[in-house]
Image (cartoon, grey):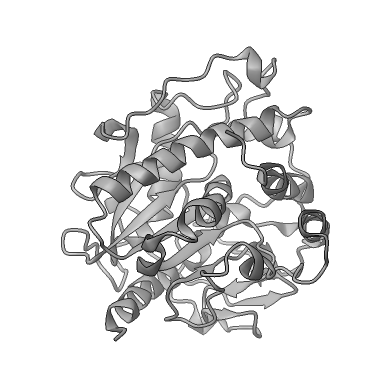
């Protein structure tokens, strides 16, 4: 079933595509037919462990960590969980949605994002990361409603995976929601439609939903029980940012996000985009110096252990976007989209700060009276 808000939510993802002026067809082409022209891939069975990219009691890509991190992996003794929804890693044109039996896509998912994003939380939490029939990257540029329907179809898997986790593994434990890009599209919908008024909301430590701008007014309209985080140890709240180089230009994407908000709610009140600084963990605020960046994750996706952390840069929230310096050394393999968008590195550039903050926020949750 397509949510009544799906068209406006999908537009958030399209903003990213238009705003960066990226050609998504270059990653593997566009399906030749419409959504209805393709048979749906088999439905994942979330009672089957192979339907999960990461589970806390198995060896997987979420277990890795840099050897020089200040916080080692601790899933065996963790008192909280993470439900991680990965970004788009399916770049094929065989279908509008991935078959989760595609081993090459699963390997890329594991080494490119489970290892380099979800692993930042293995010092605080047990990690649960479902495989799902994600929309192909070409869905962002679909000329008809095929892309929107592909995202709606993918969300059905995320919702079923969440419910399986909630009913079988959560056992009243505190948890975090962590996501990026397409994953954040699904996470935002999960928060609004499933968790917002659920008894489980009281156990949510935080939602780190990264890579898609969030209008501040959403927290007065659709996320009233899940406010913006304003400090490093706030709990029960939501965090997000979008990273650009210092000379980047997010204005086109910002304008479209605000137009989408006005169309959805009929007002410009609250259309401003929220920005959290993952170095200072403050909402907006001034430039935070390089010395406060605890370590960036260099290199690129690869099998095996993560590389050692290296020096990162400072960052500043301004007008709803996060600006940082662009590494130029050989040990960083950056993908820079048009407009100076560092979308692919929203986690990498602040890896150790995220890792340390996740532990601090978890501890603050347990310290509450």
Residue closer to the observer: 369 or 251: 369
Tell me residue 282's x, y (percent): 56, 81
Res 89 visible: no
Quadrant for the N terminus, please.
Answer: top right
Tell me the residue at 40%/33% (across/down).
Answer: 106
Tell me the residue at 57%/18% (across/down).
Answer: 94
Tell me the residue at 68%/63% (across/down).
Answer: 244
Quadrant hosting residue 160 = top left
- Residue 16 against residue 349 in the figure, above or below: above
Quadrant hosting residue 103 = top left
- Residue 331 against residue 293 in the figure, above or below: above
Quadrant hosting residue 81 = bottom left
Tell me residue 330's x, y (percent): 53, 56
Res 313 visible: yes
- Residue 278 against residue 186 in the figure, above or below: below
Quadrant for the C terminus, please.
Answer: bottom left
In the displayed structure image, the side of residue 89 where residue 121 appears, left or right: left
Tell me residue 303's x, y (percent): 35, 41
Residue closer to the observer: 173 or 356: 173
Number of marks: 0
Tell me residue 143's x, y (percent): 79, 28
């Amino acid at each position: 079933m397509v949510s009544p808000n799906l068209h406006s939510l999908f537009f958030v993802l399209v903003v990213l595509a238009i705003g960066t002026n990226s050609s998504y067809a270059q990653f593997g082409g566009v399906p030749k037919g419409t959504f209805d022209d393709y048979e749906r891939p088999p439905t994942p069975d979330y009672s089957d462990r192979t339907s999960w990219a990461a589970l806390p009691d198995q060896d997987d890509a979420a277990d890795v960590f840099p050897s020089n991190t200040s916080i080692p992996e601790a899933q065996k003794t963790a008192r909280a969980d993470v439900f991680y929804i990965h970004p788009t890693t399916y770049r094929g044109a065989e279908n509008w949605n991935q078959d989760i039996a595609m081993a090459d896509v699963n390997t890329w998912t594991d080494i490119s994002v489970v290892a380099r994003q979800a692993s930042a939380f293995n010092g605080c939490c047990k990690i649960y990361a479902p495989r799902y029939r994600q929309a192909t990257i070409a869905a962002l540029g679909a000329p008809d409603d095929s892309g929107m329907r592909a995202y709606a179809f993918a969300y059905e898997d995320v919702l079923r995976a969440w419910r399986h986790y909630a009913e079988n593994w959560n056992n009243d434990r505190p948890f975090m929601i962590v996501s990026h890009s397409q994953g954040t599209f699904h996470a935002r919908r999960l928060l609004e439609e499933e968790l917002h008024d659920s008894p489980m909301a009281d156990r949510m430590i935080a939602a780190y939903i990264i890579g898609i701008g969030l209008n501040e007014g959403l927290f007065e309209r659709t996320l009233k029980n899940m406010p913006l985080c304003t400090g490093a140890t706030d709990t029960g709240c939501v965090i997000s940012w979008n990273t650009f180089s210092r000379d980047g230009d997010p204005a086109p994407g910002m304008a479209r996000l605000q137009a989408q908000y006005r169309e959805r709610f009929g007002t410009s009140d609250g259309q401003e985009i929220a920005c959290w600084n993952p170095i200072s963990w403050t909402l907006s605020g001034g430039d935070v110096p390089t010395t406060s960046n605890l370590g960036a994750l260099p290199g690129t996706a690869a099998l095996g252990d993560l590389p050692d952390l290296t020096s990162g840069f400072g960052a500043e929230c301004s007008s709803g976007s996060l600006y940082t310096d662009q590494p130029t050394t050989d040990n960083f393999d950056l993908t820079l989209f048009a407009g100076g968008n560092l979308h692919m590195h929203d986690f990498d550039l602040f890896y150790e700060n995220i890792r340390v903050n996740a532990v601090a926020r978890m501890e603050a949750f347990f310290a509450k009276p």
